[in-house]
Image (tube, rainbow, N blue to C red):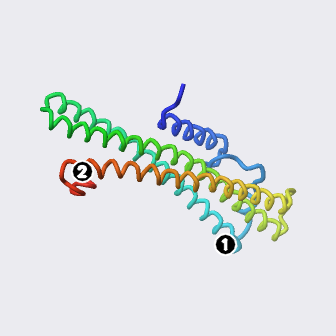
């Protein structure tokens, strides 16, 4: 059975939620190399600048993920609103005379084209959400690296070598770079789909003699 765009996006969000639960830190999937927080707390705050900066990057990555989630919610709401417009137009069409019915048919076609584009947008946003997860994991790996460096610098007993943390960052960076290519390619595809939708929209307003009037408010 083929899943709808909404179902596919919900699958991505569910996967992210499960990863969040597994991570236990409130910032997504777990890392194999981490520094116990209590080791950092032993050090004076004025020595932790690099750690604080890395933590800020984590916060930015969390915000980026939240913004993507809001875009998904907005697209889903817009699909629901547009479907409602179609239902209203179909009611008008049932009672409309011939020429008016033809205009309403074009209006419905425009709304359906908008839904098609929004469905494609949801697919793209699912990929962006997956990228946001990877970017968050990268930011967290960089955060752990800064903590490891600080602990080693102050000769606090800790078994895992800094090189292991560096390798973890490199692995995460490679994953992000690779998947970002996928997202960029998909963004180009989505742009083509957007242009198709805008052409249908432009054709509708031209047909009813309004040109671009009401372009952003239909």
Q: Which residue is mark 2?
A: 205
Q: Secondary structure at mark 1?
A: helix
Q: Is residue 139 left or right of residue 208?
A: right
Quadrant of the snapshot with the N terminus = top right
Q: CA distance from mark 2 to mark 1?
A: 57 Å
Query: Residue 83's image quarter?
Result: top left
Q: Is residue 189 left or right of residue 88?
A: right
At 75% from the left and 59% from the top, the residue drawn is 169
Q: Which residue is mark 1?
A: 49
* Position of residue 132 measured from the top left corner of the image (x, y, whole percent): 58, 53
User: What residue is shown at x 63% (from left), y 69% (from top)?
Assistant: 53
Work out whether residue 28 or residue 95 is closer to the camera in this orientation and state it. Answer: 95
Residue placed most toward the observer, 184 or 129: 184
SS of the residue under disc 2: helix
114, above or below 41, in the image: above
| x and y percentages locating residue 72 in the rendered image | 46, 46
Vertical order, 88 against 196 (above or below)? above
Q: Nearer the viewer, residue 4 or 185?
A: 185
């Amino acid at each position: 059975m083929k899943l709808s765009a909404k179902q596919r996006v919900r699958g991505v969000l569910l996967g992210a939620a499960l990863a969040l639960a597994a991570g236990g830190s409130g910032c997504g999937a777990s890392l194999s190399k981490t520094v116990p927080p209590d080791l950092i707390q032993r050090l004076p705050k004025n020595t932790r600048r690099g750690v604080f900066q890395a933590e800020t990057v984590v916060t930015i990555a969390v915000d980026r993920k939240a913004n993507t989630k809001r875009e998904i919610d907005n697209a889903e709401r817009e699909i629901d609103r547009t479907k409602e417009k179609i239902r209203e137009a179909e009611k008008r069409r049932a009672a409309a005379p011939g020429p008016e019915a033809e205009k309403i048919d074009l209006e419905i076609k425009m709304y359906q084209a908008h839904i098609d584009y929004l469905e494609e947008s949801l697919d793209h946003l699912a990929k962006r959400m997956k990228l946001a997860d990877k970017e968050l994991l990268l930011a967290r790996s960089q955060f752990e690296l800064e903590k490891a460096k600080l602990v080693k610098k102050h000769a606090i007993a800790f078994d895992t070598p800094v090189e292991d943390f560096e390798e973890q960052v490199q692995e995460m960076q490679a994953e992000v770079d690779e998947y970002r290519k996928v997202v960029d390619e998909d963004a180009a595809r989505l742009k083509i789909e957007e242009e198709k939708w805008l052409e249908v929209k432009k054709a509708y307003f031209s047909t009813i003699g309004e040109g671009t009037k009401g372009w952003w408010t239909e």
